[in-house]
Image (spheres, rainbow, N blue to C red):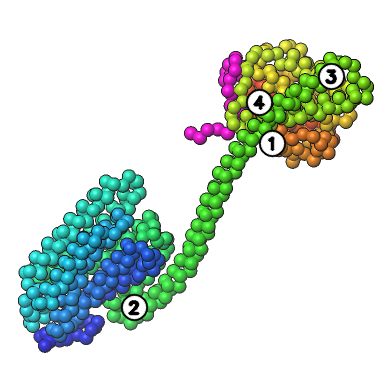
Amino acid sequence: MFCDFSAPFLFIYSSEVPSLLYYSHVPTAIVALLFGLFIYFKNRNNLASKLLLTVTVLFFILNFLNLLSWVNVDSRIITTAWLTSQVVYFSLPIFLLYLHYVFLFKKNVKPLYRNIGFLTIVALTVMVALGLTMSYFNIISCELVETPILEIYQNIVFALVFVGISVSYFFRFRQIEEGKEKRGITIFTLGVVIFLALLIFTWQIASVFDFFELEQYGLFGMVIFLGFLGYLIVQYKAFDVKVFGAQALVFALVVLIGSQFFYIQNPTNRILNGIAFVLTLVAGYYLIRSVGMEVKRKEELQVLSDSLAVANDRLKELDTAKSEFISIASHQLRTPLTAIKGYLSLILEGSYGKVPPAIQDVLDKLYTVNNRLTQLVEDLLNVSRIEAGRIQYNFQPTHIEALAAELVDMFALNAKAKNLYLKIHLPKVALPQLMIDPNKIKEVMQNLIDNALKYTKEGGVDVIVENAGDTARIIIKDTGIGIKDEDKEHLFEKFIRSKETTKMVVSGAGLGLYVGKSFVEAHGGKIWAESEGPGKGSRFIIELPVVNPNVKQGVSDQVSALAPQEKK
């Protein structure tokens, strides 16, 4: 039996078919299905991905059945399509509620609630099969008239679906503390509510007022829902899927241009639209490919950066362990070395009797070697203390000129033994007393004078103390091997020695300048080196503030500038 107007063939335009019909049904159904398949194949093991695919498949089937009932005049086809679409239309909100819960809570629904949802769908299917939802078919208007029981049953279930979505959202929202996750579930819930509201209300209003063309507009709710999902996937990696904006943009353009084929009737416009469609596909492919390669490179760099961060943390742990080991070992070594030095001094002084000349020379060499080893141990201890931030300073008012003169007297014999001069130059006007730790500054100056004598073959060393305004300046100037430009920036680093110094003096660990820089900077001063080049001597300059408000007399845990700072 056929309706009483000219029968259009399937998917052919007719005056009886609304102009928006194909545009509202075909593109939205295809877009939804492709979107669901894309998410599913990106993450097949994700329950939310499976449920989203189910929702999009149901939407696709609903569109097809509804479109079939619009473009046919055979009452049997219309009746079958309409009755089947009611089951699909009823199932869609229930599966959306299921999807909403799984997306929010990241877990499956309890079996009891799944069974309730399944039984509600089965109940409606039974009612449709028994003919309880259909009153009769109006051959004049070519429409099927439904029974009140269908509308009542659907409205009750749909109302419960909205209540379930609201309760799930507010309960989950209160559980979450992170703001980003709260925004994510809010956007998803909003998309679900808009989609359901448009789909259900337009179809219900269309049924009440017998204006079924309104159903077409409700289908666009799926497009809005997919837009929300696309945003969640790009910004929040929803469904555990990594998608970048270029993919979403190209996909939207292809669908938008492709959907125009369903309502363009002018052949020229179809050709132009086809050209635009092909160009969009080609350009989109290369755009997605280039962006994908860039994203892959960024991910690889991120993995590498994370690996380096882990390795760096491990290196810090090893460095700390190394420093602790050095500190413990140095403490253990210093005691016997000090004892050896003491006994050697007593022997050389004759406390145990006169020493034969042959043994005297050997003892002198042993004393010198022991001193070097003691200095190395002291430097290692200082380094471990500096890096741990445990160096203590005993600040006292000190005449820097007296300190320099004492050191010059101490090294006078060494200079004479090497046929080098060692001169001191003091300012005409005495400097005021400096608030310094005399032992630390003495150690720095001692190391510089010792180095100057070591690395000078001819000439000698000048120790100059002068007033430089707000600072006291100590200069150790020699006529030795000089410093290359490339070595200057590394002089004050740990375990660094130039090749020239290594050739002249084999012993030495390259720690003295590092320790000296730490001591000077802890006093608020500066230390640096100058040289005109290899063979032209060098100058090491120390500047200490005459007045330093940051230090007070007495013992202080003044942290070195080279010590690791605590994280704030």
559 left or right of 26? right
286 left or right of 10? right
Tag nearer the camera, 1 or 2: 1
Precedes in sequence: disc 4 or disc 2: 2
What span is colored magenta in the figure? 547-568
Disc 4 element? helix
Tag nearer the camera, 3 or 1: 3
- Across and down, in percent, residue 360 comes to 89, 23
Q: Which residue is mark 1?
A: 494
Q: Is residue 211 visible?
A: yes
Q: Which residue is mark 4?
A: 519
Front residue of 381/475: it is 381
26 left or right of 492? left
Disc 1 element? loop
Front residue of 48/227: it is 48
Tag nearer the camera, 3 or 4: 3
- Across and down, in percent, residue 408 comes to 80, 19
Q: Which residue is mark 3?
A: 347
Q: Amino acid at mark 1?
A: Lys
Q: Is residue 552 magenta?
A: yes
Q: Is residue 329 magenta?
A: no
- Across and down, in percent, residue 530 comes to 75, 32
